[in-house]
Amino acid sequence: MHVCAVTEAMSVSRRREGPAFPLPLARVRPAPAVRRAPPGDASTVQRPQGPLQHAADEAQRRVAATGLGLDSQGVRDRMVQRLRAAGIRSEAVLLAMASVPRHAFVDTALAAQAYEDTSLPIGHGQTISKPSVVARMLEILMDAPAARARGQLGRVLEIGTGCGYQAALLAHLARTVISVERLRTLHDKAREQLAPLRATRTAGDIRLVYGDGQRGHPPNAPYEGIIAAAGGEHLPAPWLEQLAVGGRLVAPLQRSGHSVQTLVVVERTETSYRRSFHEAVHFVPLKSGLG
């Protein structure tokens, strides 16, 4: 009895002391480092720091996304490259096309198409012309002897302000732009959209006139250049009368016996008007009166 009691007591003592041989230690992973909020910034959540490669990839994505919007210079530069490839050679015209944001003159829903070579509706049955056609007509104006010698046009009359895009381009090429629009809604809209350009005073003077474009604008005549954004079967007599000697007029015209419009160029000399016909174009019809 005594021996058994001693043996049992020793057994209980060993169980309390633990195993007689050591067990292997478990591996403990270090806690991930955390980004700590600046002192006093209780709103910042502390999260485990991601791998360095993930951070580098994220930084690269942020850099790559810069400048891809419609307001970036790169978008306009690519449009200019296409115009150059299409045959536009006037550096002054190409520079103007690179400077004016076309997307700012079209409806927001169509902004993604602003730099494609296509015409777009601007309401009231009117359109903003294709960039290639606008550039071609401006290049013809700039090729007049006086403008070529100075590198700038003098006073220019635009028939059909529309959304104001071509007037903005002309302001980079001419000293003064007089632009006439017969539709009150478009006249007001162009005034609003051209306000930032007119406020910067980095381009020529732009004067918007609400009136009948077929009558031109006698108060500021004569004009070194006249450009029309609508065409009919004849050129209105006031346009020819208000064209300065040595000046140049560019307009679409539906010639008798032809179903399509053709770009016509008129140059005024001391004694006559010289006409030349160029490529086929498509513009809205020329209308008279106010709307």
Image (spheres, rainbow, N blue to C red):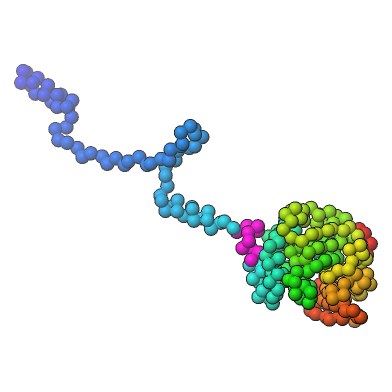
Q: Tell me if 135 is positioned left or right of 212 in this view.
A: left
Residue 56: percent from left, percent from top: 45, 53
User: Could you say which quadrant of the image residue 125 lies in?
Assistant: bottom right
Residue 115: percent from left, percent from top: 69, 64
Q: Which residue is drawn at 68% across and 71% down?
A: 91
Give the camera-side residue of 21 and 109: 109
Classify 170 as above or below 17: below
Residue 30: percent from left, percent from top: 32, 41
Give the camera-side residue of 220 and 28: 220
**In the picture, which quadrant includes the N terminus?**
top left
Q: Residue at x 31, y 42 (%)?
A: 29
Residue 98: percent from left, percent from top: 67, 65
**In the picture, which quadrant includes the C terminus?**
bottom right
Residue that sits furthest to the left in the current view:
3
Q: Tell me if 170 is positioned left or right of 99 in this view.
A: right
Q: Is residue 187 visible to the viewer in this orientation of the structure?
A: yes
* Residues drawn in magenta: 68-77
Q: Which residue is drawn at 75% across and 75% down?
A: 149
Q: Tell me if 238 is positioned left or right of 199 in this view.
A: right
Give the camera-side residue of 151 and 242: 151
Magenta stretch holds residue 109: no
Q: Is residue 148 visible to the viewer in this orientation of the structure?
A: no
Tally the marks: 0
Classify 192 as above or below 139: above
